[in-house]
Image (spheres, rainbow, N blue to C red):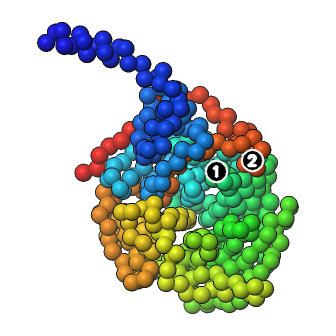
Amino acid sequence: MEIMKQRKKRRNENQDWSSLPLEIVELICKGLTITDQLHIGSVCKPWLFCTTNKFNIWVPETPWLIENSDRSSQFLFFNNTYQKVYRIYKPFRSLHGSSIVGSFRGWLFIRNKAKIFILNPLSRIQVELPLITSIGFFPPKPFDSIGMPIPIAFAISTCHKFNPITIIMVTFTGDLAWCNVGDKSWKSYRSEHSRYGNIIFYNHKIYAITQDGSNVDIFKPNNESLVLLNSTAHSTNPNIDTKLIRVYLVECGGKVFVVKRFLSEIMSLTTTFVILEVVQESCNTPKLVHANSLEDHILFVADNSIESVHSKHCPRLKNNCIYYTDYSINFRTGVGLWEFSVTARTMTKMPFSGTQFLCPCWVLPRFAFECDSNCKCNYSKWTKRKKRRAKSLRLKANNVV
């Protein structure tokens, strides 16, 4: 027995996995899930480099839920596919009053009272944005609470590797503000007739929808200003309380859709969704047309953001459905996960073990891919990261019963 222990000890001492060629490590990573890649990155620094600074390693994965809380020094993720909770140390000092506005293609949009930045939590890359105070007409909010963040919506234009180039947001006043990565201040746009609720970049244009969901304005960015190209037929919904509706813009299969989420007067629970397509034929005025399909896509809706994923990347979920979180009627059982079928127009409660999550938000688990030096995203300029403690690079997972 003692001889076997000594042989095993010598065998383990001779296995120096850190000397494995990095090309082989990258080949291994291509066949692993994001979770397994994070575990591999905690073995040694060369392996961490392979997982967080890779060129073309990407594994399609169902979005995770992240808790929107500033009470901990860790991010809390919930993987509904494997019913596990993951904890990752934040690469910044936890700030009281900070919250996640939303996410887009793996990037979190985070704000507090004076600072805004976007963050890739897996690659631990943080991109600083101009101060809120650089927006001239941006007044201070009279109250501040998690789940009701400033701004109320945002969008990011990215390069082919999903690295950020331009960021635009809807302010609390319903106006627009935008900047390029590296700018020192925000540029702003205020409409005399419209207060916006959501925005999206699509086909080198900016689509902005009003807070009541009745109109969509289409802009073209032009250096220091936004040029209004077109608008849907202007109408108003005087009977709609904007507090009882949330509007989203999302691209699915090369088309732009408007998603309206209606809330109840009591407890503000989701009652139904309405899907509209922005249709524009040649030079005619664009129209909003009711849609009964999401072009084989699945939508993941949070309070202030929305993610679109092709159904082939989520084989365990249903096609043409919307997945969202909502509180129970009495708030005693915490957060629940729901499925809304666009075609059948039915709502079904899903098995969900992350009921303790506070104001959760969907996020696609993706690394920040390294780009060429001539890419517009200027990857090499904003990827300078400070040294962190070794424990902050490890992924901690808890099984959820």
Relative image position of residue 134 (x, y in whole percent): 78, 54
Q: Residue at x 57, y 82 (%)?
A: 276
Tell me: residue 24, above or below residue 269: above
Say which of 355 and 50 sits in front. Answer: 50
Say which of 258 and 194 sits in front. Answer: 258
In the picture as drawn, the residue positioned furthest to the left comes out as: 1
Image quadrant assignment for residue 380 = top right
Does residue 262 appear in the picture of this structure?
no
Relative image position of residue 398 (x, y in whole percent): 32, 43
Q: CA distance from mark 2 to mark 1?
A: 10 Å
Q: Residue at x 80, y 48 (%)?
A: 184
Does residue 61 appear in the picture of this structure?
yes
Residue that label 2 marks: 375
Tell me: residue 224, above or below residue 98: below
Relative image position of residue 128 (x, y in whole percent): 69, 45
Residue that label 1 marks: 161
The amino acid at mark 1 is Lys
Q: Is residue 240 left or right of residue 312?
A: right
